[in-house]
Image: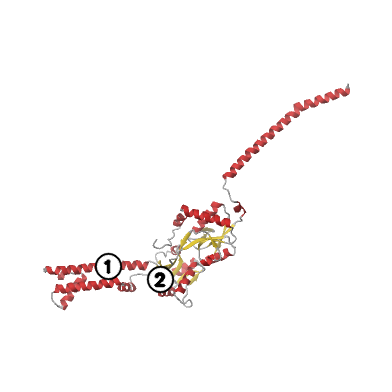
Amino acid sequence: MGPSNRACFSKEFFETTFIYFLLPLLTIALEMRIRFCAFLVIATSFYCSFANSTPEVPEFVEKQPVLTVGAVDDSLPCSVKVDGVFKGFPIEVWRHVAEKNGLNYSFQAISSYDKAIKLASQNAVDLVVSCHSVTPSRLRIVDFSVPFQRSSIVFVSRSINNVGWKFFLKILQNEVFWKCSIFLVLMTTFASIAITRGFNVNKILKNWMYLMLGSLTPIIDDKKGNYPFILLAGLSRVAFLSLIVGTVASLVYTESKPIDSRVAGRSFLQNALGEGVVVMDETSSKAWLMDLMNKLNIDNSSLQPISVKTNGEKRNYLKSNKALHFVDDSLTYKSVLKDEGLSSEFSPTIRSMNVYPQSFVFSPRLSKKIRRMINVEIANMSQTGMLVEMINHWDYESPYVNN
């Protein structure tokens, strides 16, 4: 009886334990597992939804290290470092491109444009974002982005008073002036002889002087036959004065308008070099000036421009009158004058008719995918008009003439 009762007791005990204790625990565990799986499904859905809502950064950007972006300092409105922050039109273009495409970068200040080209060619920087003109010599060592603006080069001179003996000499040498003068003298002489009605030289000269000066009262009398001759002389005088005014205005406009560098006079440039011509060293502006001097056969050993490293040095020469001329980019020369309040004292006298595209500089190590991304974004900014708005904000002067 003992063993059998223990066996029955054990069987009943285990059945009771399983039904009333273990089975509820298993049920609770299964329910918790189901809830956990449901939580994982919901959490995964939220994560995927959040991931899809954030901007997708291309895989090559994630693998790309922080870009070293060079910028030429002290070159407003292109690029300048103020209180540790770079400013300028190309800087704004670059910041938009980088922000739009999730690019990480750090700026590096560079002292000159030619040095920036050299650093880019040596892979010391990934790219340069200043106003670099695309020239054949630069294209031999570095690549450029699509252009974001265009510029030309100007020769700027201190304005002088146009009403001087040289200006009057130009008026006297003008063909319209002396032809009109001969016509007026002939008409007034003919009218004076006709009015005098005789060959009294003194009276003819007196009447001629009155007709030339427009003082008609002493020679007007009751003889109606004199009226046509007086009217002829008066009309000739009015026509002469009108043509003279037009000629003078045309000469003033011509004097104030920059001439084409291709027809610039050798004597003008020689005199200007003697008065002092300032140009930034290691720039396309200096290369253009030296090329112009060579074309005009100006001796470089006796006449040389004043080469400076910074715009501050250039402004000092201009403000102290140690130099009366300077050569600069058409987009930046106004900024040089504005900083020292010299805008009204200088004006362009020679302008290069060649228009140069300006672009970012790419180093050899910059990947093709990054280059394409930059080019596409600049092209998009141009197409949407964003570049024009930025140019207007920085108050650039158009490099085009008579457009």
* Cα separation between marks 1 and 2: 27 Å
> Which circle, 1 or 2, is nearer the viewer?
2
Q: Earlier in the sequence, mark 1 or mark 2?
A: 1
Which of the pair 214/309 is nearer the observer? 214
The reply to whether residue 121 is visible in this rendering is yes
Residue at the image point whose x is 71% and y is 30% from the top: 27
Q: Residues within 10 Å of mark 1 (few under 14, many from 20)?
A: some
Helix, strand, or loop for circle 1? helix
Asked if 306 appears above or below 108 in the picture, the reply is: below
For residue 167, which quarter of the picture? bottom left
| Count of residue discs | 2
Rendered image: mark on residue 229: none
Q: Quadrant of the N terminus?
A: top right
Residue at the image point whose x is 34% and y is 66% from the top: 253
Helix, strand, or loop for circle 2? helix
Amino acid type shown at disc 2:
Val
Asked if 102 appears above or below 327 in the picture, the reply is: above
Q: Which residue is mark 1?
A: 243
Q: Position of residue 96 (x, y in %)?
A: 52, 53
Q: Position of residue 13 (x, y in %)?
A: 80, 25
Amino acid type shown at disc 1:
Leu
Residue at the image point whose x is 47% and y is 53% from the top: 383
Residue at the image point whose x is 16% and y is 74% from the top: 193
Q: Which residue is mark 2?
A: 263
The reply to whether residue 88 is visible in this rendering is no
Q: Position of residue 214 (x, y in %)?
A: 20, 69
Image side of residue 336 versus residue 214, left or right: right
